[in-house]
Image (spheres, rainbow, N blue to C red):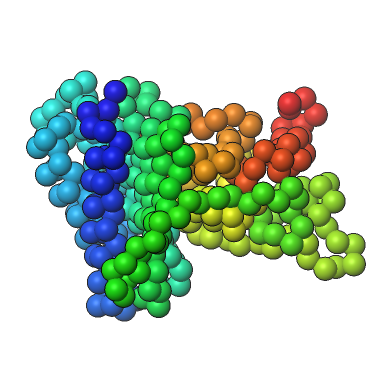
Amino acid sequence: MLPYSADILIRRVRALHEEIRSEVRAQLLQHSAEWLAHATESAEGDTQFRIDVRVEQLLLQFCQQWAQEVPFVLVAEGIAEDGWMVLPQGTSDSEAQFIMVADPIDGTRMIMYDKRSAWCLTGIAPNRGRQTTLADIEIAVQTELPTTRQNLADTLWAVRGEGAFGERHNLLDGSTTSFRPKPSSATDLRYGFAGIANFFPDGKAWLAALEENLYRQLGSMDVRGNPLVFADQYLSTGGQIYELTVGHDRFIADLRPVAFRRLGYSAFPLCAHPYDICTELIAREAGAIITDEHGQPLRTPLDIREPVAWVGYANPALRAWIEPVLLKLLHGENEG
């Protein structure tokens, strides 16, 4: 059980996210893209940039203060070698009342150039020790970190079994508007957005070939050359979850770990980790489906070093149509 009600936990997390949103916006207005994009270090699984440093400090300070009320585990990059910190300092793992996995800026590479929104992500799960997985997350919140040209920013949240909710914040006058996120009800990909992530050079050709083959077998390739499926490489897992949840995208897959294994990589280049997809509960509570590369729920341990492959479908009809073909391409004739 969690030590607070869901409402209290969501309010606390949203307060943290709003601080981070304000800090990121201030940095964008104060510094050049060249300054923000300076790489400071390479952490486990990702590169840290100047824009990350202050935000990670803010996250840690907020959590240290919160932990004076109740001990908990913070799982995040940049806070400890393995990304696992029990707060307050000196507390044992078993004393922690919950686990909070967080990515204060998911989409750093876009927001530091003021190109597209990044997202602040948080998932909260009961403390089941180091075996706690993505499937244990009971509360998720994600907040948009907008570019300086935006005056609107969204926040989505969900509680397991209670649905998904949203709020749009006007950054000019401070007003808010509530909404209920709703995935697409389309039953095919025709004239809609879909895609398999291939952000970086590693594995790009393999992933692109898989995507083309998938669309061909689904009959979504127009023989006359007119595109029937539109691609959007949103370089943020949280951003991809958002696009699926609010009905912009119909199918999204990030199969980089599969590609790296198939290509015989001894070490995986940059791919999604649990902190990147800790808000997938929101998509599922809104009615979308999120699975691993075998069509099963995500059960990756909350370890910052673990690679995560995932597939998202906007609704059950799209899953029923796409998944058999995708699994056959990934795993062969015997995959069911």
- Residue 201 versus residue 141: which sits nearer the camera? 141
Image quarter of the N terminus: top left
Percent x, y of residue 54:
22, 60
Percent x, y of residue 168:
40, 61
> In the rendered image of this protein, does residue 207 appear above or below residue 80?
below
> In the rendered image of this protein, does residue 16 appear above or below residue 168?
above
Q: Residue at x 45, y 55 (%)?
A: 179
Image quarter of the C terminus: top right
Q: Residue at x 62, y 35 (%)?
A: 293
Is residue 290 in view from this perspective? yes
> In the rendered image of this protein, does residue 90 appear above or below residue 269?
above
Percent x, y of residue 51:
29, 64
Q: Residue at x 24, y 40 (%)?
A: 8
Percent x, y of residue 319:
69, 39
- Residue 189 versus residue 309: which sits nearer the camera? 189
Is residue 39 in view from this perspective? no
Give the quarter of the image for residue 120: bottom left
Q: Residue at x 58, y 50 (%)?
A: 183
Number of disc labels? 0
Task: Report whether 147 appears left or right of 196.
Answer: left
Give the quarter of the image for residue 39: bottom left
> In the rendered image of this protein, does residue 34 appear above or below residue 312?
below
Task: Report whether 36 appears left or right of 62.
Answer: right
- Residue 171 versus residue 306: which sits nearer the camera? 171
